[in-house]
Amino acid sequence: MARGARVTRLLYKPSADAAAVAGLVLTLSLVTPALASHSRTSAPQGTHTTPSASDPYNGSAEAQQPAEAEACCAATTTPAATPAPAASDGKPSSAAGSSTPAPAATHTKGKHAAHHESKSSHKTPEVQAPPSGGASSAPTTQAAQPIAPPSAPAPAPAATVPAPASQAAAATGAGRGAKASRPPRLRARLRRRSQSSPRASTPAPRAPIFTGETTLAAAVASPSGAAAHADSDRRPAAHRPASSSQAGGLPIVRSVTRIIGVVPLVVRILIAALIALALLLATTSRFAAVRARRLARQRSQLLEDVGLLQAALLPPLPPRIGPVGTSAAYQPASGPAAGGDFYDVFALADGQIAVIVGDVSGHGRDALPQTTLVRFTLRAYLEAGLSPRASLATAAPVLERQLGGSFVTVVLATYNPRERELVVAAAGHPPPLVLGSEPAAPITTCCAPPIGAGQPTGTRQSTIAIPGGAVACFYTDGVVEARTSGRLFGARRLQKLFDELPAGASAASLLERVAQATDRRPDDMAACLIRIEGDAQAPQVRVEELELDQRDLERNRAARFLLAAGVHPAEVDHVISQLHSSVARHGRVVLELHLGEVEPEIVLRPQNVATLEPSIRASAGARGART
Amino acid sequence: MRRNESARPGASSPTSGEPAGRSRSSSPVRERGREGAPTFAISRRDLEPGTTVVAVAGELDLASAPNLKWTLNDAIAKGARRLVLDMTPVTFIDSTALGVLVGVQRNLKPGSRLALSGADSDEDVLNIFELTGLESTFDMFSTIDEALAWVRGSEAAAS
């Protein structure tokens, strides 16, 4: 028990704040001997209320205990609480005297003890009155009074000492906790011990303090004025380090020396080897760290390069281009299909906005050069001012020669903000979903074939009026060919899913939703959204164009196209006969359907990209020669 | 400019070693698609000399396209000039498989014909042909008989 107190004292002696030290010391000393003494102390909680006259020391100690406990816990002591152990019999008067420098340093020891005794005589009964309660709610103001008024003993613990609030509080809490679970008598003893500890500067009296119960009683008599006590704690602290280091340091050094002396040579060599190994490992680790840094640098450079390359294929889009909001996203397939999709959105010189979204049939690395070739070729024709259909028709023969057998599906579009019209031409590619208050879909009959399929393409074009508040969603076939429970995802599901998205959702969030809704995505997915602002008005397909030649007429394409557009069958026959004569005259004829509220208006005119005809024929001729 | 296909998956090669004649050789090849995908099946029948019917079922996609390509090109290499691709049980065709068909079509010798039959039996498949604008590239028929009649007739017309 005594050892516990001493140890804590040694541990906490360097603490600058003596009061805090006192609190901590008490807490620890309370805890340490608690277990040992608990069995011995059979006294019930109520004992303090009945202090027997035959045991004045015990009685007084217990009576004083609540107040004192609080005082110590709060890292202070109050003079009011201290005098209690009047019955200390004066036995360890020297100890008591030496240990109570507080109230007034000028007091002689004997006097001081006497003073305490006299005080305690009338103090005790009052302390008994509030044995347990009250103290916990200690007001802080009166603590500094050297002699508390009779009513004050309970609230004594006031913390006027500059102890850190948290420390003091912790100490108080711990002290209280200990108190609650410990009979008061034991508590009194413990406190006495802990209070005696600060007085350790005088080694002589210390021995008796820790040996006998009677000396403890004397120690109890010691505590005095709060501030003074704190002071007293501080002073002896200066002495302690020396004594403690002398006591504890030397044996340790001695035993270490002894141990080293006994270590056999083999072990010493082993230790040396271990040290060498440690050094070696440290060196290796250092080299590894340097190498790792270099690799990390190279990796970041590579990623940067890859990012540049990817940007060439999938350019980062600004959130707005002119009057429209744009967003695009790309999700590579997990499998071998990765690569091949591409998109681009850019402003044209005349203020229109152009969109390119496509897919090269090849996949992986081989598709990359073709992907860039197609994208920039088509972009060049669009920038040159050709319509989407004319761009496709012009670029197709050029590209076909360079695609080396693979083919490209692509959709081109230009949006004219003044006319609020979206002109779309696709080659083997699904047309965009134009989603507004009432979605508009171009006719999908007689679509133009992909670039590289050996057929003239750029034969179809749709003009869609977008009065306002609509989104054109361009996508690649990977999106609609994803599978949901074994079935194709499809454009209809895509449209439904898009409708469920919040307004202003980005292409990335759209693809994320598609990924969530599907369980297999065998191909890359790319999506590109063009958001046209304004009041929500239903977009409407205005003009459908189909370029026809003799072969198309033989295959009945014109008739299917007209029927799909809602032209009356009787009218269809009439138009077909006109087409036959027209094609016979011009070779290629453009059939224009102007769709309106009523019957579509049909316009026939000679194929209008006449200058490109030789180019197409040349490429066809080259193909013929090859095969 | 025919591209000779070599180094094909030999184990599953549906090569019919049979000489021409009227004999019917059928060598179905089945392969499992990727996880969860329906099986893809391909079989080849040689009718009279120069006439071959290749029947495919399931999904024509990235996984099955190489097999389709090999089978068709092998048939052509073996002298088939009248090819019918029966797609009646096909439920899906993707751009890779379409690319194979386009390639085969483009590499046909003059006088040879390729007909697709049954492509209109599945709405999805027909839709894909429509959307890609390839329905005008191929000669498509509803039934095998129509397709056979056309390829035989076309050859007769050519010769």
Image (cartoon, coloured by chain):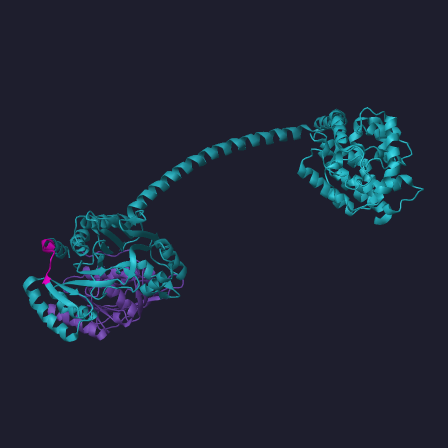
Chain colours: A cyan, B purple
The residue located at (88%, 27%) in the rendering is: A110
The residue located at (40%, 66%) in the rendering is: A485
Q: Nearer the viewer, residue A546 or A592?
A: A592
Quadrant housing residue A620? bottom left
Which residue of the protein is positioned furthest toward the left in this rendering?
A585
From where the camera sits, is residue B72 visible?
yes
Q: Is residue A479 above or below residue B48?
A: above
The residue located at (22%, 63%) in the rendering is: A541
Q: Nearer the viewer, residue B29 or A335?
A: A335
Q: Position of residue A393 (x, y in %)?
A: 16, 55
Q: Position of residue A404 (x, y in %)?
A: 21, 52
Q: Nearer the viewer, residue A584 or B103?
A: A584
Magenta residues?
Answer: A605-613
Membership of A610 in magenta stretch: yes
Membership of A446 in magenta stretch: no
* Quadrant location, the N terminus of chain B: bottom left
Quadrant housing residue A129? top right
* Quadrant location, the C terminus of chain B: bottom left
**Badge count:** 0
Q: Nearer the viewer, residue A439 or A354?
A: A439
Quadrant housing residue A174? top right
In the image: residue A520, left or right of residue A14? left
Which residue of the protein is positioned furthest toward the right in this rendering?
A54
Q: Position of residue A175 (x, y in %)?
A: 75, 42
Q: Is residue A257 above or below residue B38?
A: above
From where the camera sits, is residue A42 visible?
no
Q: Position of residue B119 (x, y in %)?
A: 26, 69
In the image: residue A477, left or right of residue A227? left
In the image: residue A83, left or right of residue A524? right
Q: Is residue A521 above or below residue A140?
A: below
